[in-house]
Amino acid sequence: MKRLSIRARLTLWYTGILAATLILLGGASYGLLMRGLWQDVDATLEGVAKTVVQAANRPPAELIPPDLDEVLRRLFGPSFTDRFYQFLDPDGRLDPRWPRFGGEPLHVSPKALKNAAEGYATFETRPGNGRFPVRVLTFPVVQRGRMVNVLQVGMSLEGLSMARQHFLWTLAALVPLALALAGTGGWLLARRALRPVDQMTTTARRIEAEHLAQRLDGAEVDDELGRLARTLNEMLARLEATFAQVRRFSADASHELRTPLTVMKGEIEVALRSPRDPAEYQRVLESALEEVESMTRLVDDLLLLSRADAGALRWEAEPVELDRLVEEVAKEGEILGRGKQVRVKILGLEPLIAQGDSQRLKQLLRNLVDNGVKYTPPGGQVTLTLRAVRHNGSEQNSQFAIRNSKLSESIGLWAEIIVRDAGIGIPPEALPRIFERFYRVDPARSREAGGAGLGLCIAKTIAEAHGGRIEVQSIPGAGSTFTIVLPLAG
């Protein structure tokens, strides 16, 4: 079933709410109108009855005042005295001493006659001789403390019925008209209000993977649609950055894989052009094996980063003795630095335990020490320091990182590992980008050193996955300092 558009739903809701409001207001107005009309009728009858009673209380010589008809005509109109009053004796029979209207007499009910005998007036609605009922007031006429007559004053409800009919016809005519006008106005207003959404939809349809630089209009307006446009523009900016990163990643990965493949292909082709001795074939195979190992490490690094991006990277959550880990990495770094005459030493070491994957944390430290050894000139040194400090934890998305961060916050201490080298340093303009994939400060020298530009990116990924962070400070020509902050286990 096709769903109605937002414009149609807004119009229907608006019209429905207005219809309910008009019905409630109409019902309340009808009730108030009828109550007022009934009160006016009863007040008029009561006023006439009191006037007649006052006239009846005059001296006997003026038992029937000559101006009574005129008084009644002023109160009820010219036809009242002919049709709508009569005097009864205490037994409920017509009193011949008083005039009565020329039509059929109004019958008095036993209840009204009883109330009159007790001194109470009674209002009743009775069927009339015509199409409309009659409102009758039965009122006692008391002289010298004794009821001498019963006065019945009646009034046709024709005026009340006509007023009610006119009111209902007016409601029946105006409510549909008001709803039609309101529905049309609501449709036009909804269309105008949602016009920016249609424009956003049209623009969004034109945006493709190759044209992510386009942005939606209306982001400068400070309302709901403006916030939507700004949110979508921010999403497009993120998508553009992601697509650019994927393209750059693909290009760099292809280039990194193509270089060893080209070397392997060239050496194998040269070896196959003419017969060689076994030693030459062995050299070619050893060279090919080195390139295969380089590609294997590159593919493993790429797989690690892609799994981290997808949130599918699994960590072994176990207690890790960071002091032993630093010692092991320092020994490996010492072996790496011997050929370059670079010393790797530990300046400070505290017995600290973190919760995480020991192999990944070792890979993190190994990448930093390896970089330090590569870019430190002969005679220099790379130092490692492990200590407990008070740090503000970084906010991470993974549950493992959040759990580690909360755990370290509960004990108030974090592990800080400092890797400092005396190498060539990093230019200030390159510092914000050194953790990007395949980024190299000096591409030529990095390839000569055998790097693919993924080591620091992997180090940052591992640190953040463990609920920590990695920071760098560097002075060109004076070396670099990498600081790793990790949450401690309880």
Image: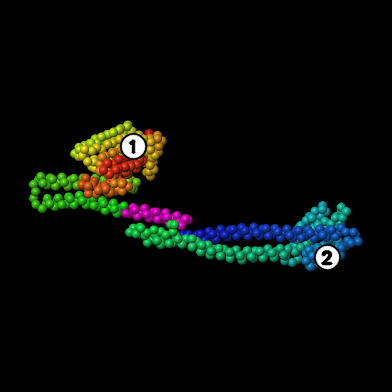
Q: Position of residue 62 (x, y in %)?
A: 89, 62
Q: Specify the farthest residue to the right.
A: 61
Left or right, 338 with respect to 139, comes to left
* Residue type (three-letter) at the residue carrying disc 2: Asp
Instruction: Please tell me which residue lies in front, 120 or 337.
Output: 337
Colour option used: rainbow
Q: Work out whether residue 476 can be spotted.
A: yes
Left or right, 201 with respect to 171, comes to left
Q: Position of residue 376 (x, y in %)?
A: 23, 41
Left or right, 408 with respect to 140, comes to left
Q: Is 451 drawn above or below residue 64 in the view shown?
A: above
Q: Work out whether residue 8 can be spotted.
A: no
Q: Position of residue 185 (x, y in %)?
A: 53, 64
Q: Is residue 232 magenta?
A: yes
Q: Secondary structure at mark 1?
A: strand
Instruction: Please tell me which residue lies in front, 293 or 134.
Output: 293
Residue 109 occupies which quadrant of the picture? Answer: bottom right
Q: Which residue is mark 2?
A: 69
Whichever of callouts 2 and 1 sits on the residue coming sooner in the sequence is 2
* Residue type (three-letter) at the residue carrying disc 1: Glu
Q: Which mark is residue 416?
A: 1
Q: Nearer the viewer, mark 2 or mark 1?
A: 1
Cα separation, mark 2 vs mark 1, equals 112 Å
Q: Is 48 drawn above or below residue 350 in the view shown?
A: below
Specify the quadrant that holds the C terminus. Answer: top left
Residue at image coords 79%, 58%: 138
Q: Which residues are magenta?
A: 221-244
Residue 297 occupies which quadrant of the picture? Answer: top left
Q: Is residue 122 magenta?
A: no
